[in-house]
Image (cartoon, rainbow, N blue to C red):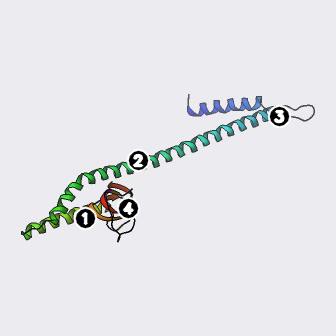
Amino acid sequence: MSQKSKDETRNEAVDEVVDSTAPAEEPHGETANQPDAAALEKAVRQLEEQLQAEKDKLLRLAAEYDNFRKRTAKERESLFSEIRGDTIAQLLPVYDNLARALKQPCTDEAYFKGIQLIMAQLEEIFANLGVTEIPAAGEKFDANRHHAVMHVEDPEKGESVVVEELEKGFMIGDRVIRFSTVIVAN
């Protein structure tokens, strides 16, 4: 069949359906398809309810996806921070050894200058990674940041004041990597 004859056949079929569903006159002027209008309204309401239910499902799905995205981003950041902290914790013995080397008397000026440069470079790396030293000497003792190994009586110092720092403590943001090892007065 050609396209034209298919279109003509389809149009004839539509005309037959329209003719067969044309409203017939009732004796009192009412049409026969009023019950059909009520059924159509009911069907429209059902479709609108289904559409609203699908919209609600879509909104819930979008909210769940957004929450998932935020949660995974937060977990990723937390994991990165934890790994960074663990890596820095493994470098801290090197820092301690360099600090001890700088405190020792040295007659070789070039050797001493080399140790100073290495320490400066390590401190710069720490700063770039957001690592900060925990203030200790002269500060009020804080069990969340300091580890007290000794108490001394010192009438000149206040209650629970750090007198001496034995080992530096470090933090990244609010997370303590290593507590400061300190001596506390009174």
Q: Nearer the viewer, residue 133 or 140?
A: 140
Q: Nearer the viewer, mark 4 or mark 2?
A: 4
With respect to residue 125, does 5 lie above or below?
above
Which amino acid is tagged 4? Phe
Cα separation between marks 3 and 2: 61 Å
Query: Residue at point 72% right, 34% down?
Result: 43
SS for tag 1? helix
Q: Are marks 4 and 1 in contact (CB under 8 Å)?
A: no
Q: Earlier in the sequence, mark 3 or mark 2?
A: 3
Q: Nearer the viewer, mark 1 or mark 3?
A: 1
| Place of residue 57 in the rendered image (x, y in percent of width and height, measured from the top left) | 59, 40
The residue to which callout 1 is attached is 124
SS for tag 3? helix
SS for tag 4? loop
Cα separation between marks 1 and 3: 85 Å
Which amino acid is tagged 1? Glu
Q: Are marks 4 and 3 in contact (CB under 8 Å)?
A: no
The residue to which callout 3 is attached is 34
Near mark 3 (Cα within 10 A), the count class, few <14, some 14-19 or many ≥20, is: few
Near mark 4 (Cα within 10 A), the count class, few <14, some 14-19 or many ≥20, is: many
Q: Nearer the viewer, residue 166 or 25?
A: 166
Q: Nearer the viewer, mark 4 or mark 1?
A: 4
Q: Earlier in the sequence, mark 2 or mark 1?
A: 2
Left or right position of 7 against 162 = right
Cα separation between marks 4 and 3: 87 Å
Q: Earlier in the sequence, mark 1 or mark 3?
A: 3
Name the disc covering residue 141, or none: 4
Q: Bounds of the magenta span? A: 148-157
Name the disc covering residue 75, or none: 2
Which amino acid is tagged 3? Gln
